[in-house]
């Protein structure tokens, strides 16, 4: 097969010469074909071999395209999985940080509660001591007043006895 440019009534066109005939493709794409009436076995074998090679090339190209598409899909799936894993890790880190913050806040609250309880206990103890001291002072004052009243009563009775003893005498 040979391909070359020819002039066809003033138009440039391409002629493909086939053994025993030719095919001219004009600019308006109409075709005229004068086929070779008889192809020998050698030509048939060569054409068949060329057809098989062409099919193998197409098949290899299709397989390469499929492999490239599969690799691209695998890469996209891996990237998506990595992004999902990163998002899950970020969410887990956020939850962990929130838990740590909550634990810290609880520890601070517990410490504040403990301090407040200690202060309340110290104040209650001081109040008890002050109340006990005040009661002791009150008891002492009451006892002193009772002693004074008893002494006054005893003095009054003694005075009454003296007065009644003087009136009898």
Image (tube, grey):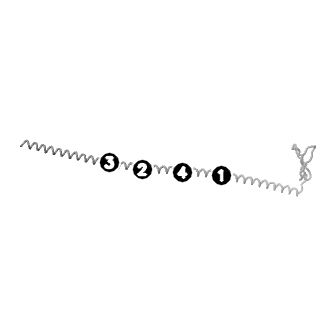
Q: Nearer the viewer, mark 2 or mark 1?
A: 2
Question: CA–CA distance between discs 3 and 4?
Answer: 49 Å
Q: Nearer the viewer, mark 2 or mark 4?
A: 2
Looking at the image, tell me whether mark 3 or mark 1 is earlier in sequence order.
Answer: 1
Looking at the image, tell me whether mark 3 or mark 4 is earlier in sequence order.
Answer: 4
Q: Residue furthest left?
A: 169
Residue on which the image places disc 1: 79
Horizontal and vertical percent for residue 112? Answer: 44, 49
Residue 60 horizontal side relative to residue 87, left or right? right
Residue on which the image places disc 4: 97
Marks 3 and 1: CB-CB under 8 Å?
no
Q: Which mark is residue 130?
A: 3
Residue on which the image places disc 2: 115
Residue at 51% x, 50% y is 101
Residue 17 horizontal side relative to residue 102, left or right? right
Quarter of the C terminus within the rendering: top left
Looking at the image, tell me whether mark 2 or mark 1 is earlier in sequence order.
Answer: 1
Marks 2 and 4: CB-CB under 8 Å?
no
**Element under label 4?**
helix
């Amino acid at each position: 097969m040979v391909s070359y440019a020819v002039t066809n009534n003033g138009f440039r066109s391409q002629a493909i010469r086939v053994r025993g005939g030719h095919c001219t493709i004009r600019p308006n794409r109409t075709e005229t074909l004068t086929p070779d009436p008889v192809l020998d076995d050698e030509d048939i074998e060569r054409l068949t071999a060329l057809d098989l090679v062409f099919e193998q090339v197409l098949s290899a190209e299709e397989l390469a395209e499929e492999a490239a598409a599969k690799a691209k899909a695998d890469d996209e799936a891996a990237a998506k999985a990595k992004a999902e894993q990163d998002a899950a890790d970020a969410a887990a880190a956020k939850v962990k940080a929130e838990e740590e913050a909550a634990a810290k806040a609880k520890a601070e609250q517990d410490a504040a509660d403990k301090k407040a309880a200690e202060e309340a206990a110290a104040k209650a103890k001081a109040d008890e001591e002050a109340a006990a001291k005040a009661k002791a002072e009150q008891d002492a004052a009451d006892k002193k007043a009772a002693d004074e009243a008893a002494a006054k009563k005893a003095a009054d009775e003694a005075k009454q006895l003296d007065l009644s003893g003087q009136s009898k005498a």
